[in-house]
Image (tube, rainbow, N blue to C red):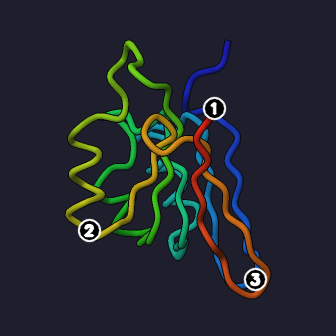
Amino acid sequence: MGKNNDSILLYGRFFGTRFLFTGDLEEEGEIKLLQRYPQLQVDVLKLGHHGSKGSSSEAFLDQLKPKIALVSVGLNNRYKHPHEETLQRLTSRGISIYRTDQDGAIRLKGWNQWQLETVHEK
């Protein structure tokens, strides 16, 4: 069975906006990614490992400089993700945070310009 740092990462640039989706990546994997791509920066970052304490390190956030952080996490999950320290790292850098446990589904739409929407179940 694979480990969290074996996650598939997805990077893309669409209409001038750079996205990085990090699966369950944790700090060890973040370090390797930054070593391999030292100039990598993104606009939208899907946090690794549901925003756990061991993901989205200070060095990772400082290198990537995301404007928006997406956290895929279940409501009242037993692991208490996302971790408060991770949220503080984002907040202290002025990164906007969207969480599926609080905001519902998160959708980015657009063509020449992106619009972020949240969708709650009825």
**Image coords of residue 55 (percent x, y):** 39, 41
What's under tag 2, amino acid-wise? Arg
**Label 1 near label 2: C-beta < 8 Å?**
no
Which is nearer the N-term, disc 2 or disc 1? 1
What residue is rendered at 28% in x and 70% in y? 94
- Using the image, tell me which numbered label, if any, was put on residue 93: 2
Q: Give the residue at mark 3.
A: 15
- Disc 3 is placed on an element classified as loop
What residue is rendered at 57% in x and 53% in y? 118
Camera-near label (2 vs 1) is 2
Neighbourhood count class around disc 3 (C-alpha, 10 Å): few under 14, some 14–19, many 20 upward = few
What's under tag 1, amino acid-wise? Asp
**Image coords of residue 19 (percent x, y):** 63, 65
Vertical side of 4 occupied by 30: above or below: below
Vertical side of 30 occupied by 68: above or below: below
**Image coords of residue 80 (percent x, y):** 32, 22
What residue is rendered at 21% in x and 42% in y? 85
**Image coords of residue 101 (percent x, y):** 46, 34
Cα separation between marks 2 and 1: 27 Å
- Using the image, tell me which numbered label, if any, was put on residue 6: 1
Cα separation between marks 2 and 3: 25 Å
Neighbourhood count class around disc 2 (C-alpha, 10 Å): few under 14, some 14–19, many 20 upward = some
- 22 or 15, which is in the foreground? 15
